[in-house]
Image (spheres, rainbow, N blue to C red):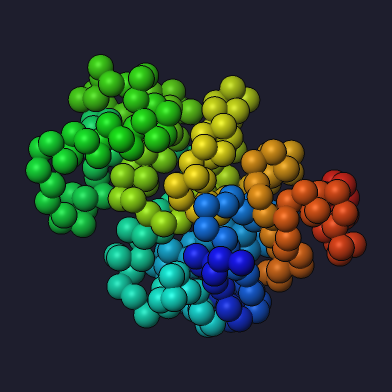
Amino acid sequence: MESPVLKIENFAASFGEHAILKDINLSFSRNTLTAIMGPSGCGKTTLIRCINRMHELVPNAKVSGKIILDNQDVYGTDPIIVRRQIGMVFQRPNPFPTMSIYDNVIAGYNLNGIKLRKEEMDQTVEESLKKAALWEEVKDALHRKGSFLSGGQQQRLCIARALAMHPEILLLDEPTSALDPKSTAHIEELVCQLKTGVTIIQVTHNIAQAARVSDFTAFIYLGELVEFGPSTRMFTGPKDKRTEEYLSGKFG
């Protein structure tokens, strides 16, 4: 079996004395989509914020253990480099409101002080918007503000912005929870296409969505990893009673 692109080893996270994640061990295979599931407040979002070192931006945040990307400890690497390698898309679409669609896509380069030639910028913008299935809809409006787009288009713009940096991992924090059903279907179709080029870790509350889009599923409950495995098995024959109860809607 190919070695995992990302490994989480004996990992714990807290805010001050309040433990949020306890002894998490997880591996992610390259070019797969893993769904992170569990009830509200169980630590799902904290886990992905730890993966790209956003957790530590909060006062009193602490972590222990290791997160290894391509044999390098993320916590021994400059966080700016980590966030280039591990892109993130949030729950609510958040294009930079004062920037054009074009500038939104290449924002990561400007924020990191990476200079690109005009033709490199043009190519990056076009490629990223094509990957995010947005190019045809916006190619004649690249210099308009991103805020005129619909919610679903704005979320795809945020995905394009993350992809523009050529990350190895793409973290999605409930990317469809603020969207209508049609836009949600668009994003689901998109993530299934994207995983051929990037490893995706997606937090979702939506059990049906996880069953549709993911290759693997991790179930977290009260900060602990209860169960992890191929989604087909998790959804048809979970091994842990808590997973079964969550999937059948007994709590959530």
Residue 102 falls in which quadrant of the image? top left
Q: How many marks?
A: 0
Residue 12 falls in which quadrant of the image? bottom right
Q: Is residue 21 above or below residue 206?
A: below
Q: Position of residue 208 (x, y in %)?
A: 74, 39
Q: Position of residue 100 (x, y in %)?
A: 23, 30
Whether residue 178 is visible, yes or no, is no
Q: Is residue 38 above or below residue 76?
A: above
Q: Is residue 11 above or below residue 164?
A: below
Q: Residue at x 79, y 54 (%)?
A: 234
Quadrant (top left, top right, bottom left, bottom right) of the N terminus: bottom right
* Nearer to us in this view, 2 or 115: 2
Q: Residue at x 41, y 76 (%)?
A: 72
Asked whether, in this view, residue 185 is left or right of residue 106, the answer is: right
Q: Position of residue 29 (x, y in %)?
A: 57, 61
Q: Is residue 15 above or below residue 218?
A: below
Q: Residue at x 41, y 34 (%)?
A: 132
Question: Which residue is at the far left?
Answer: 117
Residue 216 falls in which quadrant of the image? bottom right
Whether residue 23 is visible, yes or no, is yes
Asked whether, in this view, residue 2 is left or right of residue 247, the answer is: left
Asked whether, in this view, residue 249 is left or right of residue 23, the answer is: right
Q: Position of residue 18 (x, y in %)?
A: 61, 76
